[in-house]
Image (tube, rainbow, N blue to C red):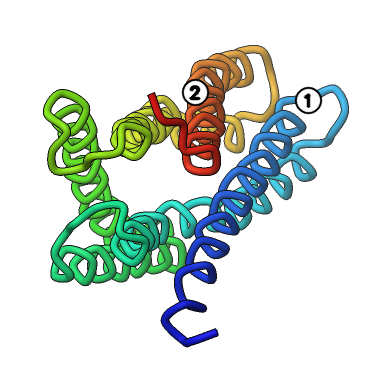
Amino acid sequence: MALADFAYPTLVYVHLLLFVLWLGADVGVFVLGQHFRRRETYTLDQRIALLKLLVIIDLTPRTAWALMVPISLTVSYMGGWWDLPLAIVLFGWAIAAVWLWLVFDAHNHDMTPRAARDRKIEGWIRYLLCAGYLFLGAESLLTNHPIEPDWLAWKALLFGLIFAAAIMIDVAFKPVGAQLGRLLTEGSSDETEIPLRRTMDRTRIWVWAVYLLLLVTAFLGNVKPIY
């Protein structure tokens, strides 16, 4: 097998591996979040330890999410599924590199102005990619251009919706910082626990939305239905 023939199936495998890491690690984050809620089972120190572990594991789906952009573009380019310029593929890799740097730099400097700046820039990247994928998918489904296969156009649209749902996870989860600070300062009570639990309950709606969209997107990519 020539190197070029070996490259495409390898990229498809990496694409699938990113899906597994994204969904699998995110389920781990979800389970840890569920255990954090059980104040009758764990001490506050144990729950904080679970939360710290959750933050570390959450780096895996965030990494997979960022890498999914250039990998999907490269797979489409090398597989001939979408006649896109090589410059766009290279730009996708550059965006992913910046995105990943922001994610890990914010993690390493958490609770600092630098981390806040990183997350703000990362947020704008995600907003722009969300809008771009939604437009790409919708335009392709309506006009068969620039993506011709309907299943791939649907994948682009659904990927945009995944961006939107994942963005909403962060939006819904935003009050947790202040609520968690109050919990640590005042201790566990109904006054500190109930608002925190309500915020986590609202966040779960968007988490389930991401899971569903990921499963549908993976199904389209593997089955490639023609209609």
Give SS at disc 2: helix
Q: Which mark is residue 38?
A: 1
Rendering quarter of residue 194: top right
Residue 102 at x, y percent in the picture: 32, 64
Task: Specify whether 52 is left or right of 88.
Answer: right
Residue that badge 2 annotates = 209
Under mark 1, the amino acid is: Arg
Residue 80 at x, y percent in the picture: 30, 59
Q: Quadrant of the C terminus?
A: top left
Residue 36 at x, y percent in the picture: 72, 33
Residue 105 at x, y percent in the picture: 38, 68
Q: Give whichever of 117, 221 is nearer the camera.
A: 221
1 vs 2, front mark: 2
Q: Quadrant of the N terminus?
A: bottom right
Task: Specify whether 208 is left or right of 68.
Answer: right
| Nearer-N-terminus badge (1/2) | 1
- Name the residue located 61 percent from the left edge and 54 percent from the top edge: 21
Q: Give whichever of 186, 82 is nearer the camera.
A: 82
Give SS at disc 1: loop
Rendering quarter of residue 142: top left
